[in-house]
Amino acid sequence: MGENSKYQVNFEELGAQISKLQFGANDSDSESFKEDSIMEKLLNPSKTNMDFLVSYYKELFDKKGPQLIYTLDCNDTQINKILDTLLTISNHPEIMCSCKLLYNSTKVVTENEENNQANSSNQTDRALYFLLRKIPQKIENLIEQRISVIGNVDAGKSTTLGVLTKGALDNGRGSARKNIFRHKHEIESGRTSSIGSEMIGFDKDSSDPIYAENVRSLSWNDISSKASKVVIFHDLAGHEKYLKTTVLGLTIGQPETVMLVVGANAGMVGMAKEHLGLTLALQVPVFFVITKVDMCPKNVLDDTLKSLFKLLKSQGIRKVPFQIRSMADVIASVEFSNPLKICPIFLVSNTTGQGLDFLRQYLNILPPSTPHERDTQAFMEIKEIFSVPFVGSVVSGILDKGSIAVGDSFWIGPDQFGRYQTTSIKSIQYNRVNVPISYAGQSVSLCLKKIPRSSLRRGMVLLQKIENFVPKSYSVFEADILILYHTSTISLKYQAVIHCRAIRQTARIIHIYNKENLRSGDKAKVVLKFMSQPEFLTVGSRIIFREGKTKGIGKITKLYEPEQVPRLLEQLKQETPTR
């Protein structure tokens, strides 16, 4: 396939260097729940056994979180008895979870035997796979997952989101994407230029997707009230002129997973490789959705898959491509021990519906990310600001740590001078529903007391007021960086836009340790200084920087307080060789 993009990503160099930046990875191993004693108690649900099973499943939820896939070996005669017992347990007041049979491999084995198909399977191949998910008693206890949707222009990102979230197939002329565009020029051009948000919810009882029963679309309030789990999609732009908006969306949205959409008729062209490189740099799990399979000739689709598999297996990426062909594949892809290694690939058509059921089930059973810290100081970065008539100043963002309740006192800042103000919370909305409290990991909107809209900006933070704590701000910091691509050399006084979570600000390189210039593929320790105002930073935060076609990644390793900066600058001046 031809390479149409002006951008270049050296995946081999990127893969070789990312591990050295020590961003960390999720190496958690999945555990098997197949226990003979549990099976015996499920088949003989006496009162003693039921008490034991309730205690066992309660402990299982406490250990694994509010959602898990439970596997049981069985034979044909045991299925109904197991189902009845599990349903009874799920309705117990101490458990209160939904119980859905995802896949019955016993049925598949039996059908193969009836059709005289060769089968070397033994009894262990006959298994039931259940999805157990806690039913939230309050809306603020919902399971929430965030997925950023990226890919080249015209790959079908907005159309796929429209079909997934609204439940109606596309007519082949863009009817699905019109439902989610935010601006008139997007509808006219058919291209996304801003960061859009859409939601799909899964029912409390059946775990099925929640869709409107009539022509009216469901509001986020309606979906949240019926759901036990919601997935929030961030629809990002695919055109290269909107790259800065896409980078901002990937950093500010804090996605748990990325959905990279590829047109079957085009393949990994244009900005698709660029977006994949950014995802690898941020170390976020990714899965692929190949669209337009209904209109694509088989030989072209085969070429697209072949080139994608080759790219994912290449030296710089080293992922395991896994094409989804059945419900068993969906379960296997989710149960894989390291989500950063496996890369599920879905083939879908938004006009015929082919493959969409597998994609919905994948979103349904995708496990939540690592639990957030709730018993600590609350911290949230501001990503959007609003001035609501008769309400006041409202900010939105993702609560990183702790919990926020109405009436809590917070520091907010820094302003252009690096100072913080105090405020308190008037009201909280979670998924556009008023709630008294919100927890870490949730996307919330907060109404602030006595803070004018003019004093707020994106990138500020809210920090809960605690005794003997005053937040600080920083203009100068040290970082380990890797240059992904640059046409010439980078030297002192080079300026680029730094993306660090909700922060987007120009910074200048004021020192490069042990080097005079940097080129594509180089790694170095540098000292950077913000050009406009100080920001709230933390050691270990990932950064992306760009300037035109120049792109790099890095990690903050050291912060310098304002009183330390003059001495640092004098020291660096002595270390810098004269030219």
Image: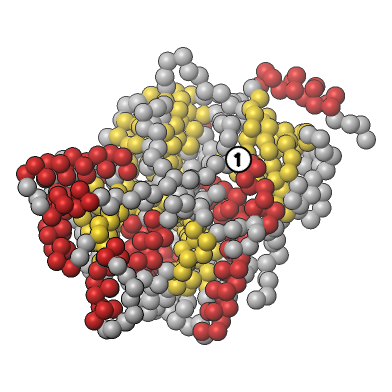
Quarter of the image with the C terminus in it: top right
The image shows residue 237 at horizontal and vertical percentages of 54, 60
Q: Is residue 440 above or below residue 558?
A: below
Figure label count: 1
Q: Quadrant of residue 392?
A: top left
Q: Residue furthest right?
A: 579
Q: Is residue 399 left or right of residue 220?
A: right
Could one spot residue 527 in this view of the protein?
A: yes
Dot 1 lies on which element? loop
Decide which of 184, 88 is in the foreground and name it.
Answer: 88
Decide which of 514, 272 is in the foreground and name it.
Answer: 514
> Disc 1 residue type?
Gln
Which colour assignment does the render follow? Answer: secondary structure
The image shows residue 181 at horizontal and vertical percentages of 44, 63
Q: Is residue 156 left or right of residue 104?
A: right
Residue under the point 22% across and 59% down: 100
Q: Is residue 257 above or below residue 528?
A: below
Q: Is residue 228 above or below residue 562?
A: below
Q: Is residue 299 left or right of residue 16?
A: left
Could one spot residue 386 in this view of the protein?
A: no
Q: Residue furthest left?
A: 47
Quarter of the image with the N terminus in it: bottom right
Q: Is residue 106 left or right of residue 450?
A: left
Residue under the point 64% across and 32% down: 557
The image shows residue 183 at horizontal and vertical percentages of 47, 61
Residue, disc 1? 22
Decide which of 445, 26 is in the foreground and name it.
Answer: 26
Residue under the point 84% across and 27% down: 575
Disc 1 residue crowd, few under 14, some 14–19, many 20+, Cα 10 Å: few
Q: Quadrant of residue 375?
A: top left
The image shows residue 534 at horizontal and vertical percentages of 62, 30
Residue under the point 42% across and 76% down: 349
